[in-house]
Image (cartoon, grey):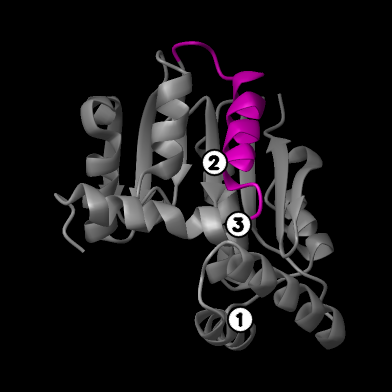
Amino acid sequence: MSFSDPDAVARYAQGPIRQVPGFHGMQQMARILLAERVPDDGHVLVLGAGGGLELKAFADAQPGWRFTGVDPSAEMLKLATTTLGPLAPRAALVEGHIDDAPFGPFDGATCLLTLHFLPAEQRLHTLTEVRRRLAPGAPFIVAHHSVDDTADKRQSWLSRYAAFAVASGIPAANMVNATAAIDARLPLLSPAQDEALLGQAGFVDIELFYAGFTFRGWVARTPD
């Protein structure tokens, strides 16, 4: 992909829209939930910021917020800079993982469509390190694949996920391959397991705010 090519950037941005039910609505809800506690001049940590889609959505809606975006892919961070355009000076981008993020403390944090790539032990470490970087009472928004851990239910929900993507314009053959890869390679957890990890990491007031076929999203906060 050429990150100087607006068409290439647009093609990347279409991926989540076609595969994640209510993608824009989920981002908007995440921003609203952050704004309940993040001040108008707050500093927000965005984990898995490559591509810059949520960074731009948040920056457009909250002109006083600053951001630190973290992602392991240098190329995706270049794309985030392109996506942000004139808003880019408001976001400090860090190549790496949560351990490479500054300690803040941040007024809020998000991790969207990212944690499903991590096995449970690594997820817990990531969640714990996010919590350590947040101010008391700060909100944390997370959303990713989270499906029932029985084989039959998992296959049923993955089939629905694929049907949504096909209905949104992705070729059916592509989604056959995609769902097979998700089932075989992603360390998917159940919603109950995901909620338990948030609690183990030290978050409180854990509430479901979003559900779209295989995707779930939660809002939580650090203790006061």
Q: Earlier in the sequence, mark 1 or mark 2?
A: 2
Q: What is the chief secondary structure element of the magenta stretch?
A: helix
Q: Residue 163 or 204: which is nearer the viewer?
A: 163
Q: What stretch is highlighted in magenta?
A: 21-41
Residue 190 quadrant: bottom right
Q: Which of marks 3 and 1 is nearer the N terminus?
A: 3
- Residue 105, relative to residue 125: is it above or below? above
Q: How crowded is mark 2: few (under 14 residues within 10 Å), some or many (20 or more)?
A: many
- Find out whether the residues at labels 3 and 1 contact each other: C-beta distance under 8 Å: no
Label 1 vs label 2, nearer the camera:
1
Provide the secondary structure element on which disc 2 rests. Answer: strand
* Residue on which disc 1 sits: 179
Could you tell me which residue is drawn at 65 percent across and 33 percent down? Answer: 29
* Residue on which disc 3 sits: 20
* Residue on which disc 2 sits: 110
Residue 224 quadrant: top right
Amino acid carrying mark 2 in the image? Thr
The alpha-carbon separation of the residues under discs 1 and 2 comes to 25 Å
Could you tell me which residue is drawn at 21 percent across and 64 percent down? Answer: 1
- Find out whether the residues at labels 1 and 2 contact each other: C-beta distance under 8 Å: no
Provide the secondary structure element on which disc 1 rests. Answer: helix
Q: Where is residue 187 in the image (x, y as percent from the top left)?
A: 62, 77
Is residue 40 inside the magenta stretch? Answer: yes
Q: Where is residue 49 in the image (x, y as percent from the top left)?
A: 39, 47
Amino acid carrying mark 3 in the image? Val
